[in-house]
Amino acid sequence: MKPPPHYHLKYKISVSGAAETGHCAPDALEKAKEIGKEIASHNAVLITGATTGFPYWAAIGAKEAGGFVIGVSPADSEKNHIEDYKLPVDYHDIIIYTGFEYSGRNLLLTRSADAVIVGCGRMGTLNEFTIAFEDNKPIGILTGAGGSTEWIDEIIKDSHRGSGKVVYDSDPKILVEKVIELIKKEKIIEV
């Protein structure tokens, strides 16, 4: 299939990670920021859960690099997002208010992305990972970030569902490049 001359859809890469980062590796947030910068430098769109912590730092990095950031919120409105969930609105260009709380938001977040990068996480991050894995999405794991990233490879082995489309790296630049290569293999039309 040949694309029309104006065809130029950008890759959409979700960054998943803990909103509360006390258990993360000391350099995890700086690496999240680097991931955001790398996504922007590849002219891709960053999608986050419109939350604090690891995804927020990725959003900061993307915006500092001139990137475009979409947030997918568990709240049903901006007011609910800020007042009830206590979530930020800065460093995002668009926030989609789902009203589906965290588990519903996680499904929409991963389904709307071409790939998911997982950093230091907790249960919600693991939920996003398992949705992406079950959907056979390209996934990048930032190794050495702390939290659930330290045992995701064991979950994959113990689940007896194959290895999926999962790549690992501790370097944000290399990880984003590996993920983009996986996305390119998935695309019907090369851009």
Image (spheres, rainbow, N blue to C red):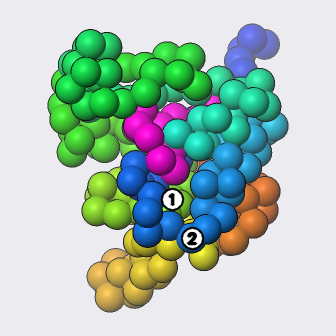
Q: Position of residue 167 (x, y in %)?
A: 61, 69
Q: Which residue is mark 1?
A: 118
**Foreground residue among 160 and 53:** 53
Q: Is residue 176 above or below residue 121?
A: above
Nearer the observer, disc 1 or disc 2? Answer: 2
Cα–Cα gap, marks 1 and 2: 14 Å
Of callouts 1 and 2, which one flags the residue occurring earlier in the amino acid sequence?
2
Q: Is residue 160 above or below residue 46?
A: below
Q: Is residue 170 magenta?
A: no
Q: Which residues are magenta?
A: 43-55
**Foreground residue among 48 and 43:** 48
The residue depicted at 78 percent of the width and 62 percent of the height is 174
Q: Position of residue 29 (x, y in %)?
A: 61, 54
Q: Is residue 49 magenta?
A: yes
The residue depicted at 60 percent of the width and 35 percent of the height is 59
The residue depicted at 25 percent of the width and 21 percent of the height is 83
As drawn, the label of residue 25 is 2
Crowding around mark 2 (Cα neighbors within 10 Å: few <14, some 14 to 19, many 20+) is: some
Helix, strand or loop status at disc 2: loop
Q: Position of residue 7 (x, y in %)?
A: 71, 18
How many marks overall? 2
Is residue 181 visible to the viewer in this orientation of the structure?
A: no
Place residue 121 in its image quadrant.
Answer: bottom left
Left or right of 182 on screen, residue 133: left
Which residue type does callout 2 highlight?
Ala
Left or right of 112 on screen, residue 2: right
Q: Quadrant of the N terminus?
A: top right
The residue depicted at 58 percent of the width and 25 percent of the height is 91
Which residue type does callout 1 highlight?
Val
Crowding around mark 1 (Cα neighbors within 10 Å: few <14, some 14 to 19, many 20+) is: many
As drawn, the label of residue 24 is none
